[in-house]
Amino acid sequence: MLRTISPVDGSVVAERPMAKTPQITQAIKQARAAQQQWQAYTLSQRASICEAAVQYFERNSELIASEISWQMGRPIVYCAGEIKGLAQRARHMINIAPHALADIKPVQTPGFNTFIRRQPLGVVFTIAPWNYPLLTTVNSLIPALMAGNSVVLKPSAQTPLCGEHFVSAFTQAGVPEHLVQCLFLSHEDTAKIVASRDVDFVCFTGSVAGGQHMEQAAAGTFLGLGLELGGKDPAYVRTDADVPYSAEQLVDGAFFNSGQSCCGVERIYVHHSVYKAFVAAFIKHVNTYQLGDPLNAATTLGPVVKPAAANWVRGQIRDAQAAGAKAMIDTSMFPLDDGKGCYLAPQVLVEVDHSMSVMKDESFGPVVGIMKVNNDAQALTLMNDSGLGLTASIWTQDQDVAITLGEQLQTGTVFMNRCDYLDPALAWTGVKNTGKGQTLSELGYHQLSRAKSFNFKTQL
């Protein structure tokens, strides 16, 4: 049995039977049959059905938001925002599908008709995480369906109800039976599906270790993998930054969702000329957070997902302090943090350096290190000193400098004067151990369809 334990109060919020081998085999067989039907639908028919599925989430927003809060601990005041984000991303990907999937016509040679047509892959296997269970799923699910594929979804064991909502949404919208399915799977059975080559593409969002397991399982199969893995995302506050604005935005970027965001800000480098003012403004904003029951509308910081996750962050903080870092937040102001459970006070560390885990290893929790730098070159070197590369942000008034630095940053996305945001018109991708492939934008369709060339001689 899959059993989901709520970080809110330790209660069991869901129990579901795990899929067994016969059920898994049958589900994939059904998905392939449904895909053959779905492929025959016109693009406009697919768009209408996908739009109807989006409206399901909007109609049921209050229920789904409450379930997300119970399952993974995000404050209820923010959970509806994920549903709004789902709708925005889905509608963007629906709207660009006719262009993204249109035939490519090269310069024509007289007597020939040549073109490239994008065709569906078949069955797409989407493996979703718990931290943004709707947004991470919709990134691949909508373009997969619009491109003519079927989808087998494995939701996180922490957020199983979200997977069931996707099935309900598309079933009610009128897709062929079994086109969108949800399976509750063990890690072992997930790896077996990948190794079997019974599916045609895998979209995995999760840890670096999880991505490595996917590649190991797929070894020798030539199965396509899209891997969106970890982040240790840096920010650089330049001497010309708007300090009050930068501090406020970066607090949100570091502590929203209790820091449990792949593109959350985990390390900040500040020019020495504005360092003192920035740190003071940053700490002031952090101390306004309310750690508490996420079902309470006044709560702005909920529990992290599991005690083990909280203890990992506590260990990073302890180790950094032992190595000379200074903790700037009085945790007694956050009495729910008992030092052992899921409720974890936010923490800001200064006098940090790259010998410390908190500045090198993904934290995925409410802690951030702030480091003083002397110039752009030092900041750039430190920002690139990571095995991960998802996003980075530059806080400056000078767009030309931001572009120059951005071209040298080893990340998939570069922000200026914003952070922790996905624009569905832009490719979401990473470098180094953050993974491979891309979702969203027109490029997201390239990953979820295959090119077929047509070369017709029309004059004999």
Image: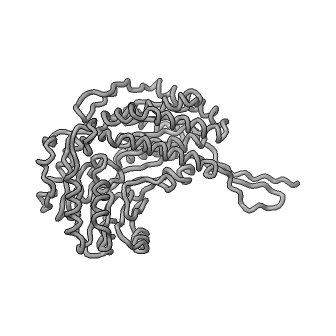
Please tell me in which quadrant of the rendered image residue 186 appears: top left
- Report the number of discs: 0
The foreground one among 434 and 291 is: 291
* Residue drawn at 22 percent across, 49 percent down: 289
Task: Estimate the x, y position of residue 242 in percent, counting from the top left.
Answer: 31, 68
* Residue drawn at 26 percent across, 48 percent down: 365
* Residue drawn at 23 percent across, 60 percent down: 282
| Residue 198 can be seen, yes or no | no
| Residue 444 can be seen, yes or no | yes
Position of residue 347 relative to residue 78, above or below, is below
The foreground one among 43 and 91 is: 91
Please tell me in which quadrant of the rendered image residue 356 appears: bottom left
Task: Estimate the x, y position of residue 430 in percent, counting from the top left.
Answer: 42, 56
- Residue at the front extreme, as displayed: 298
Task: Estimate the x, y position of residue 136 in percent, counting from the top left.
Answer: 43, 44
* Residue drawn at 12 percent across, 52 percent down: 330
The foreground one among 169 and 288 is: 288
The image quadrant where one finds the N terminus is top left
Look at the image and name its color scheme. one colour
The image quadrant where one finds the C terminus is bottom right
Task: Estimate the x, y position of residue 65 in percent, counting from the top left.
Answer: 37, 36
The foreground one among 414 and 35 is: 414
